[in-house]
């Protein structure tokens, strides 16, 4: 059973997870930019491809803005089931994306 004393610890964990998510998104953006600049990859996400073609700074703003919005929601909201599920899902997705980026960097360097 959760007590009132447990809530700050859970909130801190979610905030830490949010900062990790922002870092992973930044790495994703940098790796994607690198791969696109040097022709090592093609962007599969049509929205991200459109943003990148329009403006590289806009690409970075959107790539970092979305996790920052989620981090903001975590800091102002009550600890809800959906906030935890959203944060966990986003973290797992970005970890998988990061492994894909590492894979194609290794493959392209061979």
Image (spheres, rainbow, N blue to C red):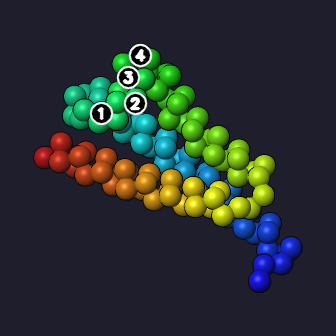
Q: Secondary structure at mark 1?
A: loop
Measured Cα–Cα span from mark 3 to mark 2:
5 Å
Which residue is found at the position 54% from the left and 28% from the top?
A: 61
Give me the residue at 55% from left, 51% from top. Answer: 21
Residue 3: give x, y in percent of width and height.
83, 78
The reply to whether discs 2 and 1 touch (Cβ–Cβ < 8 Å) is yes
Of labels 3 and 1, earlier in sequence is 1
Q: Earlier in the sequence, mark 4 or mark 2?
A: 2
Q: CA distance from mark 2 to mark 1?
A: 7 Å
Which badge, 1 or 4, comes first in the chain's sequence?
1
Residue 48 disc label: 2
Q: Secondary structure at mark 2?
A: helix
Q: CA distance from mark 4 to mark 2?
A: 10 Å
Residue sitting at the far right: 4
Residue identified by numbered label 1: 43
Disc marking residue 50: 3
Mark earlier in primary sequence (2, 1): 1
| Disc 4 + disc 2, Cβ < 8 Å | no
Locate residue 88: give its quadrant: bottom right
Seen as rendered, the residue at the extreme top is 54
Instruction: Please tell me whether residue 3 is drawn above or below residue 18 in the rendered image.
Output: below
Nearer-the-camera pick, 82 or 92: 82
- Secondary structure found at label 3: helix
Dot 1: within a 10 Å radius of its alpha carbon, few (fewer than 14), some, or many (20 or more) residues? some
Marks 3 and 1 sit apart, C-alpha to C-alpha, by 9 Å
Q: Is residue 34 visible?
A: no
Q: Is residue 8 left or right of residue 55?
A: right
**Residue shown at 62% from the left, 52% from the top:** 18
Check contact, mark 3 vs mark 2: CB within 8 A.
yes
Question: Disc 4 vs disc 3: Cβ atoms closer than 8 Å?
Answer: yes
Q: Secondary structure at mark 4?
A: helix
């Amino acid at each position: 059973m959760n007590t009132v004393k447990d809530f700050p610890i859970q909130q801190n964990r979610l905030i830490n997870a949010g900062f990790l998510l922002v870092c992973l998104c930044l790495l994703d953006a940098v790796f994607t930019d690198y791969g696109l600049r040097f022709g090592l990859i093609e962007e599969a996400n049509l929205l991200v491809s459109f943003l990148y073609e329009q403006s590289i700074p806009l690409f970075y703003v959107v790539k970092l803005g979305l996790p920052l919005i989620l981090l903001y929601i975590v800091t102002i909201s009550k600890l809800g089931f959906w906030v935890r599920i959203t944060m966990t899902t986003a973290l797992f997705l970005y970890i998988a994306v990061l492994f894909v980026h590492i894979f194609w960097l290794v493959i392209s360097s061979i």
